[in-house]
Each structure stands twice: as C-alpha cells, then as structure tokens.
Image (cartoon, rainbow, N blue to C red):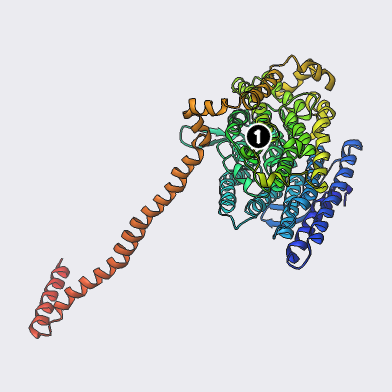
Amino acid sequence: MNTLILLSLIICIAPMIAAIIIGLVSKRVGNTIAHSVTTVSVGIAFILACYLAKLVFIDNQVANANVYTWALSGAFQFSVGFLVDKLTALMMLTVTFVSLLVHVYSIGYMRGDAGYARFFSYISLFTFAMLMLVGANNFLQLFFGWEGVGLVSYLLIGFWYQRESANQGSLKAFIVNRIGDFGFILGIAGILSYFGSLDYATVFQAVPAVAANNTMLGLTQHWQVGVISLIAILLFIGAMGKSAQVPLHVWLPESMEGPTPISALIHAATMVTAGIYMVARLSPLYEYAPAALSFILVIGATGALFTGILAIVQNDIKRVVAYSTLSQLGYMVAALGVSGYSLGIFHLVTHACFKALLFLAAGSVIIAMHHEQDMRKMGGLWRYLPVTYICFLIGALSLSAIPPFAGFFSKDAIIDIIRNSQMPGSSYAYACVLAGSFVTAFYVFRAFFMTFHTDCRVDATVREHLHESPGVVYWPLIILAIPSVIIGGLLVNGLALQGDLLGSAITVLPTHSAALRLEDDYSGAWAMLAHAYLTPAFWLACFGIVVAWFCYMSQPHIPAWAAKRFSLLYRILVDKYGFDSFNDWFFVRGTRNLARFAYRIGDVKLVDDFMVNGSGRLISWLSSVTRRVQSGYLYHYALIMIVGLLLLMIWLAK
C-alpha cells in the first residue's frame, strides 16, 4: 500500500478506535483513561498528519487509491479510498491540530461532568468522521463523512440531554441539515446518472466534455438548465446546510447548547467547514457552472454581512462568537463564488485558529464565572483572567482583520478578489463584505469591552472566587494564539497571491482568475502590510473598534438609547430577521395543520367514515334489502322465478 494512503488510513482510524473503545467501556473506566486514550489517539493522528504534510508539500508526493471495494451493483463499483494531495494534507493538519487542542482543553473544562467519558468518545468520533470526509476520493465516502459529522454533532449539541433547550437545539440542527442533505443526495445522484461513476478523478476528467456538449435537462416544457449547473447547485445546497448559509443558517446558534469545546470544534475546523472544503475540492466541476458560482457568491456575501449584524444584539458571549462564525463562513463562501478557492481555504485555516481561540477563551471566562454566559453580568475581568484576556484580544484583532494578525491576510485578500471580479453579483457582494469589516470589528470588540472592561457587574459571591483557569485550559489558548498571529503572513504567498500552495488540487479556468490581479498589487506579506493602511476595509475595521469603545466604554448609555429609539429595527434583529418565526409558522405549524387536515379528511372522513364504516353501512343496507326478498312465502319465490324466466327469454330472443 502506498505510504500516503497508509498514513491517511491510520490518521482516520486512530480516533475511531479510541472512540469505540471508550464508548463501549465508558461506564467502567475512570476519567483519566477516557481522556488519555482519546487524546493520545488524536495526538498520533496529528503527528502523522504533520509527516503527511511534509511528504506532500516538501517532497511533492500525491496519491489516489482505493483501500477496498465496498459494494458492486451492476456496472457500478463503490469503493473506500483516499485522495491525498495538498488540499487533503492541509485539511487533515488543520482538523487534527484543532481537535488535539480541544481534547486537551476539554480535560479541564469537562472536569466533574457525569458524562465525561462519553464526551471524549463523541469528540474523537467526530474527528474521525471529518477526517474521512476530507480524505475521500469519491462522492460516496464524502457522503459517509458528511453524514457522520452530522450525526455526531446531533449527539454533541444535545450532550446535556437533561436540558430541554439542548434537545431542541440538537433536533433543530439535525432537521435543518436534512433539508440541505436532500439537495446533496440529489446532486450525487445526478453525478452517478450523468457521469456513471462516483470517483472524483473519473468525474473531473469527464466534466469538460459534458460542458462542451452543453448537456441540458428540461425541468419544464419551457425551462431547461445545464446539467453541470444543476448538479453544482444541488451539491451546494448540501453545503448551505453544513456550512450554515442563509437561509439554512438557523441551526448554528443553537449549537451553543453543547459544551464550549464542542462549539470550538464544530465552528472552527470541522463540521461547518465541510461545505467550504467540498466546493473547493469540486472546483473542476464548479468552474464549468458559472450560474452556480454567482449563486454561491450572492449567498455567501449576504451571510457575511447580515448574520454578522445579528451578533450586535446578542448578550450571550458564546452566541456572539457563534454569529461571527456565520459571518466568516459567508466570507469563505463568497471567495468560492469568484473562483477564489485557495482564498476560501486560506480563510478556513486562519479562521480555524482564531475562532477556536475565541471560543476556548470564552469557555475560560465561563468557567471562571461559574458557567454564567451573559455579558451583562460580567465586566472588569481583565484583572482576574490576564491570560484569557490577552488571548481573547488576539482572537478579536485577528477576527477584525487588523494587521499583522492572521485574519487580516485572508480576509483582506477575499475582499480584494471580490472587488476585482467580474462575476455577476460581485458589486453587491463587494458592498456586503466591505460593510462586514465594520460590523465584525464592532460586535467582537463590543463583546471584548463588555466582558473584560467596563464596570464589574459580577455577582459578589462569584467575584470572591474569580481566578485564571487552570493550565490545562489556558495552555491551548496560548498555543492557538501563536498561529492566530503569524499563520496568515506565512501562508499568504502560497494561498492568496500566487495561489500555488494547493497546486493541482484546485482548478481555476483562465476566465475566472481574478486572483491573478492580486499579484499586481502585492508582492508578499510585507507589501500587504504596507498597503493595508490605504484600504477601506482597514479603516472600516478601525472605525468599528472606535465605535464599540465609544458606545460601551465612553458613553455606555448609548446602546440602551439606540435600542429604544430604533425599537423596530432592534426587534427585527432580536427576532433574527424572523427566520425562526417563519420556520415555526410555515414549517412547524404548517406541518401540524397539514397533519390535522390529513387526519380529519383522509383518516377520519375518507378511511374511517367512508371506507371502513361506509362499507359496513353498505353491507347493512344491502342485507336489509335482500332480507325483504327472503319472505318465506312460496308465491313470492314463484313470482321471482317467473319474472326471471321472462327476462331470460326476452334476452335470448334478441
């Protein structure tokens, strides 16, 4: 077996074996064994992922092979295999790195929890499913990992199942993702139908010929759509569910019902990035579907701005960071929509670091506050949590795209490529992502000031015990803070300017290469830093920080005044644009009303009353009629026989 394939197999299997072992014996092993087995397994996966990255990026090795045949059906063969290239290696390295730190962090965060061993089994299984997804060389295995992260996320969001809110949150995530997965399944069915294979290499090789033939599918008599565009949009609908794009974004804030380490793992490097990875992996398909790219661009840009605005009215520190995830995912998706696949992956990597940092820092605050999450009950915590304070500040600066932090390089490059693009919808998208620069800086520093500065509003009994989190909690923060500062500058040349770090893993047609124009403006990380102070995005971000300081530090009465003065707008934002209300009215109540109608009309009236009871009434009526014929008098029977004989003679006479 090829070395790369073997390494990929071990990287995937190690967390799975640990998850199964701890899952089966979770009630009979101690907490130390539970976290040791799972953490060591993910640590092994991370070390091997580092070696895999060395073989791929330095030694330029690539592999694509099947491990075994899963099923045969007629002419179709379904296999389990791995495609190991630069995109796979980068994703495996990112997933295992963040997962390892989350495992270590969870040792301190989950201490004393009744489901301690079960928790570690779940997150290890979650890591396995994501690794299988990013390592797949075919659509079937992609779908296996896709559904795997969906299933385990349901278990993790509802981990504290004693809480009704956790049960509701996990159910909401599961159902919304099923909507997206319906489109995803149809897209895979289209791939199998028109390409005759689910293997990436086979499909990618056939795409140009199908595009050249301009194969069309008639949806109605007068409306036809290109097969490739339809398949691409259907697959992206799946990505809209997994990566929480409007309007299938409503489940992601509810994922906050799970423990904070889960929020970090789901939001930073695993489930929500699956859709970004999928579109980038399928770039040879999407490049021949310009209509799908425009659709992706508009959806991503809309989410980047409007879901970020919702973070402004949130008071739960975890929900602020959750809505920032929705917004940053929008930036990644918008980059994909202008064929900036390497930029989308670039922001995915930097975001994985600073978003995990923000979530884990928020978790450190929650631990210190005895699991209080309302920022209105915090304030002045910088004195008590100095390490958490500095780490949260680094994450906030990176999220706000302030140079030289990592988020600046990836986010600024995305804004520039959208500005340079001629893709339909790019002008609208540019306005959204540019305005999002101000919004992002404002909401994250609003959270920063409310939590760590302003007057201390902490309950007196809690204040007496305020102190920095233990080392097992803050060391992962320190480790994550390092790439949150430097990784953008290290990767910007390969992923943003030249875009050659991913090599042949990404396909961009010459007509879509707006990213090439970035090289005319910038020649490296230092040039980007020097140019940053001339960009509108930088000044909008700085303005957002200043406005947050003015509203929550200098003039703290302004937010209450603004909420009262613009009460209608405030209510719209608190109601999250009415998505939940509409879903409840249209889908939940609508389904219930439809079920009642079907019950009353279909079940009660049609089945019970008409068919079941009706047949009984018909038999009863027929029996009452025939009973009159059976009178017992001979002359009645004789008359019937005579009449019958006459009718028979008349019929025969004809």
Query: Which percent across, then down, holds residue 618?
Result: 24, 68
Name the spot of residue 156 as percent of width and height, x first.
Answer: 66, 52
In the image, 508 versus 126, the foreground residue is: 126
Where is residue 284, by image quadrant?
top right
Indicate whether 205 appears above or below 634.
above
Q: Residue at x 25, y 72 (%)?
A: 619
| Residue sitting farthest toward the right | 59
Q: Residues within 10 Å of mark 1 (few under 14, many from 20)?
A: many
- Give the residue type that dot 1 points to: Ser
Residue 139 seen anywhere in this rendered image of the structure: no
The quarter of the picture where the C terminus appears is: bottom left
Classify residue 585 as left or right of residue 457.
Answer: left
Q: Look at 42% across and 51% down and name the residue there.
A: 592
Q: Which residue is outermost to the left? A: 635
Relative to residue 471, is residue 167 drawn left or right? Answer: left
| Secondary structure beneath label 1 | helix
Left/right of residue 102 with respect to residue 458 in the rendered view? right
Front residue of 65 and 151: 151
Q: Residue at x 61, y 44 (%)?
A: 184
Q: Which residue is mark 1?
A: 324
The reply to whether residue 483 is in sight is yes
**Residue sitting nearer the eye, 239 or 488:** 488
Q: Residue furthest top?
A: 534
**Camera-nearest residue between 194 and 175:** 175
Estimate the x, y position of residue 202 in percent, counting from the top left.
73, 42
- Where does residue 118 sit, x and y in percent of width and height? 71, 59
